[in-house]
Amino acid sequence: MDYREAAEFLKAHDNYLILTHKRPDGDTIGCAAGLCRALRKLGKTAHILPTEDATTLLVGYLDGLTAPEGFVPGTVVSVDIAALGLLPDNAQPYRDRIDLAIDHHPSQEFFAKETCLEADKAACGEIIWKICNELGVMDADIAAPLYVAVSTDCGCFVYANTTPHTHKVAAALMEQGIDFKALNKRHFRTKTHKRMTLESMLYQRMKFYHDGTVAVAPITRELLDSIGATSEDTDDIAAFAGQIEGVLHSVTIREHENGEFRISVRTKADLLNATRVCARLGGGGHKAASGCTVKGTVAEAEAAILAAIDDQLAQPTQD
């Protein structure tokens, strides 16, 4: 369904539970908070499923919005979730009863009963903004988390996925009187001391391939432990390697428990389709930003993603 039909769906139902994806980012958190507030403004009962691993940078946007224990939803909506594999553990009981999925990922698997997909949008927050406008509800409390959703998923409007529509949405949200200066400072111009140390050490350990156009940055648990860094210090670290002069495509390999490595790929999409790269290893996402998970050692993870990149670069087209 399109955003107008999604708005009509939301008008017609009630008792909402909104799901976010695991390892939540600013887009899924901001969308959930903005949509929840919009539904409540319409007089609906709406809650967000409590997140299990949101960072302190983001969890505050959910204050007062999470579902109380024992809440039984009548309608389940997911935001910014492309696949059931991205559901956190506490959302598993709802995997077969998601009524509406609102998403912007080309790799959307259409697991919900209804899907509102706009794969040309930089952020799912852009779609939620359109839906809110169709619902006739908007204020600063709704606009602030939606601004976070939109701005974080396009790197404060510098990533290649940024479009005129992205700027249009951001401008409209700013016109609601939100403190966008504070939001920009918080999300884009503040780094912990440990994060600065991590970036320095990552650069020293980084490897370059294809005449310096491909950078691979391994983030092992040993590295994080050596500087006392946590997951909060690695927020959006996937964008770091791509800032280096000459790098067109970057890979971040993050070690987790049980020999699991989560890989983030950022590319110049017309030269290398990140979705196709990660799909070779069971992942997905966008043409310029995708991810996947592999098991083994860091060396095996690096070899697997480099092989996928080489295979994709050999293809005649990246469309």
Image (cartoon, rainbow, N blue to C red):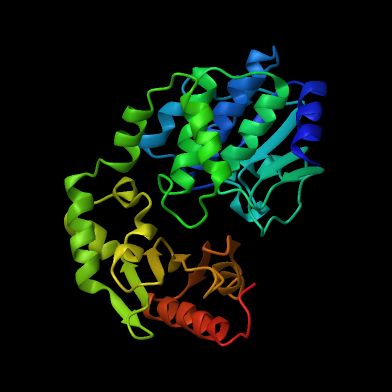
Q: Residue 49: x percent and y percent?
A: 59, 32
Q: Residue 300: x percent and y percent?
A: 43, 80
Query: Can the viewer see residue 212?
Result: yes
Query: Can the viewer see residue 53?
Result: no
Please name whichever residue, 143 or 28, is drawn nearer the observer in this view of the structure: 143
Q: Residue at x 62, y 21 (%)?
A: 38
> What is the quadrant of residue 241 in the picture?
bottom left
Q: In this view, does 211 lie above or below 133?
A: below
Please name whichever residue, 56 or 164, is drawn nearer the observer in this view of the structure: 164
Q: Residue at x 23, y 59 (%)?
A: 199
Tell whether 296 sits left or right of 314. left
Quadrant placement of the N terminus: top right
Q: Which residue is drawn at 56% across and 27% down?
A: 34
> What is the quadrant of residue 164 in the picture?
top right
Q: Is residue 164 above or below residue 41?
A: below
Q: Residue 287: x percent and y percent?
A: 57, 64
Q: How many labels does the image show?
A: 0
Quadrant placement of the C terminus: bottom right
Q: Residue at x 44, y 67 (%)?
A: 261
Q: Residue 285: x percent and y percent?
A: 58, 60
> What is the quadrant of residue 201 in the picture?
bottom left
Tell whether 261 sits left or right of 35. left
Please name whichever residue, 85 or 237, is drawn nearer the observer in this view of the structure: 237
Q: In this view, does 88 lie above or below 58?
A: below
